[in-house]
Image (cartoon, rainbow, N blue to C red):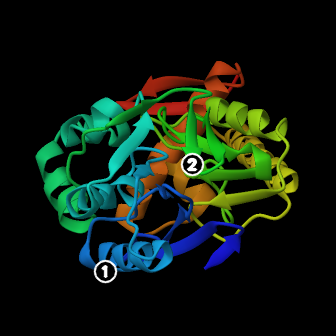
Amino acid sequence: MLLKDFIYLIELPGKMFLPNINVYLINCEEPVLIDAGYGFQESTEKLLHEIKRITESRGLEKVVVTHAHPDHFAGAAVLKRELNVSVAAHKLAVPVLSDLKKLTINYYGFKDNVSSFIKLFLQGLCKAEPINVDIVLDENDEIKVGEYSLRVIHTPGHTPCHISLYLEEKEVLFSGDVVVGEGTTWIGLPCGDVAVYIDSLEKLLKMDLKLILPAHGPVIYNPKKRIKELIRRKLSREEEIVKLLQEKPRTVEELALALYNEQDRYRLLWLLNVVKAYLKDLERKGKIVYRWEEGRKIYSVK
């Protein structure tokens, strides 16, 4: 779908509990793709078809990966094989994109069952494989897109390596997961940091933006309003946690159940890491403390 001038939105499918993802093709003299979706056949077949259709068989020059989560990078391996594209990513993404074990430990927090997580989730479900980065990016680097350029904006918090891409001449931001079109951005330990994430949002608030193109959810036509809303939602969740701890001390598990009422064991495991990220930020702010009691970590207000 043509969004603006030479920018095309390609919505790629997820499956099971994996969400759909928006990737963006900038169809200029040397076409550039932002993110690559999953590596399974339904996703990569649609992606290759759309690239061929939109570029009229001119192919693809490079794919820029916004961060090292498999819905964003897994399809890049297929693009490298099929179209011989170059892969660009932030310098902090390089070691985890090239080593799924490091990715599993550093970004998902697994210390045990690492090989099982790789086999079942990363390789089995997402069809991810290690990727060598050809173009290493850093803050304020520029990627040429025809007569314009994309400026790299380091926006960590969701992951340490997360970048957004700013098409300054059009005041358009490709936000990856730092600003999503609906819901909120997942921030969980070990790689997520609530305070760092809010700092990234505050950085984006200072920019001249007319349009945000997120990796998930609809296009954002009122950027500043949406960014402020996301900041408010993160801070209000912390306020909710403090209120729960004012009622009585609680464990992480008790807080997760009170906040989300999630009964699915798998989803609850992910939500525990989200609650831990909020608690880490509240500890730094000096609002809460914890103690150990019969082998359990109990949090309370300070």
Which residue is denoted by mark 2 in the rendering? 255
Quick check: marks 1 and 2 in contact, CB under 8 Å?
no
Residue 199, image x and y in percent?
71, 30
Image quadrant where residue 190 sits: top left
Between disc 1 and disc 2, whose residue precedes?
A: 1
Q: Amino acid at mark 1?
A: Glu
Residue visible at 21% across and 42% down in the picture: 100
Image quadrant where residue 94 sits: top left
Query: Is 161 placed left or right of 176 in the picture?
Result: left
Q: Residues within 10 Å of mark 2 (few under 14, many from 20)?
A: many
The numbered mark at residue 42 is 1
Q: Nearer the viewer, residue 248 or 108?
A: 108
Q: Amino acid at mark 2?
A: Leu
**Label 1 secondary element:** helix
Residue visible at 62% across and 56% down in the picture: 259
Q: Nearer the viewer, residue 263 or 156?
A: 156
Image quadrant where residue 292 sits: top left
Q: Nearer the viewer, residue 99 or 33?
A: 33
Residue 271, image x and y in percent?
48, 53
| Res 251 seen here | no
